[in-house]
Image: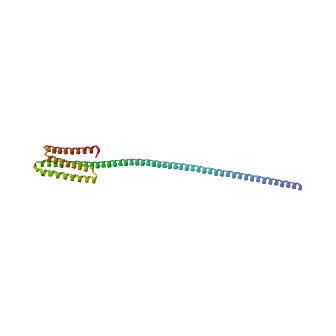
Amino acid sequence: MKKVEDNDKKEKISETKIENKEATKKEKTNEAKAESKETTKKEKTNEVITENKNTTKRAKTNQMKAENKKIAKNSILEISAEAKDNLNIESKRAHNKENNALLKEEDLEINHEKLEKIKNEIKNSKKESKDKVKKSALRKKIVRNLVIAILIIIYFLFIDLGINSIPITVYMLDLKTFAVFIAIISIVIFERAYKKDENYIAIHGIEMVVVGIETLLLLQLYSAGNEYFNYILLGITLGMIVYYLLKCLVIYIRYKVKGK
């Protein structure tokens, strides 16, 4: 009986051991399952965390990309705006340069026109002054010749009047003195013409010589008692008048034609 009881006890002990072993196994399996579940949970949480991290990173990258795109767009717009501004500024500068060039050309044209007007005015003033000088010289020449003609006419009129009013000897002496006086005047005129180198003064000297020759001719005719003395004296007087009138006319025509 004791053996049977011992065997029963042993069997019970073995069963208890087996049960304990199974229980420990179950516990271990349960712990393993729990650990595996925890690990899976941890893995899942890690995956979720990583996914969240990845999503946040993607979101951040997308945001960065969007921001970069916006920045790029803004920079492009700013660059385009600056380029447009620069183009507008350059176009304005070019337009201003063109306007300035046109204004300069207009100013040059205006200045050229002004210079031409001034030159024309100077030329006209010079021509007017020359014309005035020439006109004054013409008047002086004509007046001088007319005065000389009048004096010669008066001289021959006195000779004509002295024929009947002055005695013969006195009249002949007067003609001689007149001839000598005219010769002296002609010499003085020639010396003045030589000093001043003026042709018209020399011509006046020649005219005085001619008057002196005419005086001597009248003296010879009067001393010879020529009956045509009065007619010759009248012819000489008229000849001198015609000569001086023609001379004044030639001077005037020469001035109109040649401007001299």
Residue 140 seen in the current view: no
Number of marks: 0
Q: Position of residue 54 (x, y in %)?
A: 64, 50
Residue 191 appears left or right of 174: right
Residue at the spot 67% in from the left edge and 52% down from the top edge: 46
Residue 94 vs residue 51, the one in the foreground = 94
Residue 66 appears left or right of 189: right
Q: Which quadrant holds the N terminus?
A: bottom right
Residue at the spot 29% in from the left edge and 44% down from the top edge: 258
How was the colour assigned to the protein in this rendering? rainbow
Residue at the spot 10% in from the left edge and 49% down from the top edge: 165
Residue 114 vs residue 166, the one in the foreground = 166
Q: Position of residue 100 (x, y in %)?
A: 42, 49
Residue 98 vs residue 188, the one in the foreground = 188
Q: Position of residue 180 (x, y in %)?
A: 19, 52
Residue 169 seen in the current view: yes
Q: Position of residue 94 (x, y in %)?
A: 45, 48
Give the farthest residue toward the front. 224
Residue at the spot 36% in from the left edge and 49% down from the top edge: 115
| Image: 15 above or below 229 | below
